[in-house]
Image (cartoon, rainbow, N blue to C red):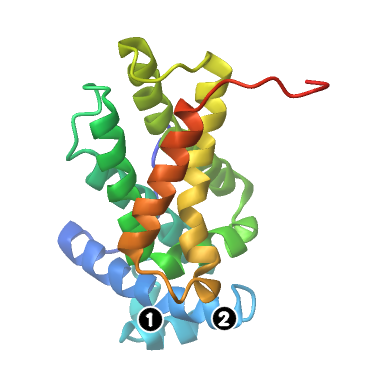
């Protein structure tokens, strides 16, 4: 797994560090979404978080650190929610529950997902590499579930189909964040139900030969 990137802090109280950084994340997400990463200042982030610029720099060193924290908070939450499930069971029921947990998370963190994909290019190379590795790790959770379903006979997929399907499941849910403006007539429950049906029907559907493939 990708090693968590260490962000320096002059504060030693871990609970206080976590609290202050959560405040930074909330303030920064709103600003990054409205103004973009480059047009947002650390002073504005501090104000949105509810403390002074001096206090801000006790918990981070650069503006890029804040963007990194936004990205990493998503992956921490994905892991926390999927850890509630028995991913080793490898049944379609578990897969459906995993999709529900993941898509509900996207609903809860819509702004964070949008900011991450719009602004992660502004991260330093090492932090961007970390973010991309975490993307692969998150996708691998679905790949493992699909592999278990294939091994049990609940799905008939080749290894390449499993890899592509895992990316499809992962990205398709993020549509809720990126296309939310066009989906006003849908509730998150309807979105989850329909997407899950489409995805599972696609994976379990009749094998067809595509001309030229």
Towards the viewer: 18 or 100: 100
* Left or right, 121 with reference to 107: right
Q: With respect to residue 126, does 86 lie above or below?
A: above
The residue located at (58%, 48%) in the rendering is: 128
Considering only order in the chain, which callout, 2 or 1, is on the residue closer to the N terminus? 2
Percent x, y for residue 100?
A: 29, 49
Percent x, y for residue 94?
A: 24, 33
Mark 2 element type? loop
Quadrant location, the C terminus: top right
Towards the viewer: 132 or 203: 203
Query: Crowdedness of circle 2 by 10 Å Cα count: few (<14), some, many (20+)?
Result: some
Inspect this view and state whether residue 129 appears: yes
Alpha carbon distance from label 1 to label 2: 17 Å
Query: Crowdedness of circle 1 by 10 Å Cα count: few (<14), some, many (20+)?
Result: few
Q: Are marks 1 and 2 in contact (CB under 8 Å)?
A: no
Towards the viewer: 98 or 70: 98
Quadrant location, the N terminus: top left
Inspect this view and state whether residue 61 appears: no
Q: Quadrant of residue 142?
A: top left
Percent x, y for residue 3?
A: 41, 35
The residue located at (17%, 40%) in the rendering is: 84
Mark 1 element type? helix
Percent x, y for residue 63?
A: 52, 69
Tag in front: 1 or 2? 2
Residue 40: assigned label:
2
The residue singled out by tag 1 in the image is: 54
Q: With respect to residue 196, does 106 lie above or below?
A: below
């Amino acid at each position: 797994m990708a090693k968590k990137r260490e962000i320096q802090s002059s504060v030693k109280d871990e609970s206080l560090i976590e609290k202050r950084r959560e405040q930074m994340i909330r303030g920064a997400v709103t600003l990054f979404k409205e103004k973009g990463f480059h047009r947002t200042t650390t002073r504005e982030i501090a104000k949105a978080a509810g403390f002074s610029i001096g206090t801000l720099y006790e918990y981070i060193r650069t503006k890029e650190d804040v963007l990194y924290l936004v990205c990493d908070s998503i992956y921490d939450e994905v892991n926390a929610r999927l850890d509630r499930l028995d991913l080793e069971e490898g049944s379609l029921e578990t897969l459906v529950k995993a999709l529900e947990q993941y898509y509900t998370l996207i609903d809860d963190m819509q702004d964070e997902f949008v900011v991450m994909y719009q602004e992660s290019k502004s991260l330093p190379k090492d932090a961007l590499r970390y973010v991309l590795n975490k993307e692969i790790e998150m996708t691998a959770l679905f790949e493992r579930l699909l592999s278990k379903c294939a091994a049990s006979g609940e799905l008939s997929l080749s290894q390449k189909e499993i890899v592509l399907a895992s990316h499809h499941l992962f990205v398709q849910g993020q549509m809720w964040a990126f296309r939310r403006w066009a989906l006003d007539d849908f509730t998150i429950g309807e979105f989850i139900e329909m997407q899950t049906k489409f995805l599972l029907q696609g994976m379990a559907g009749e094998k067809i030969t595509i001309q030229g493939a």
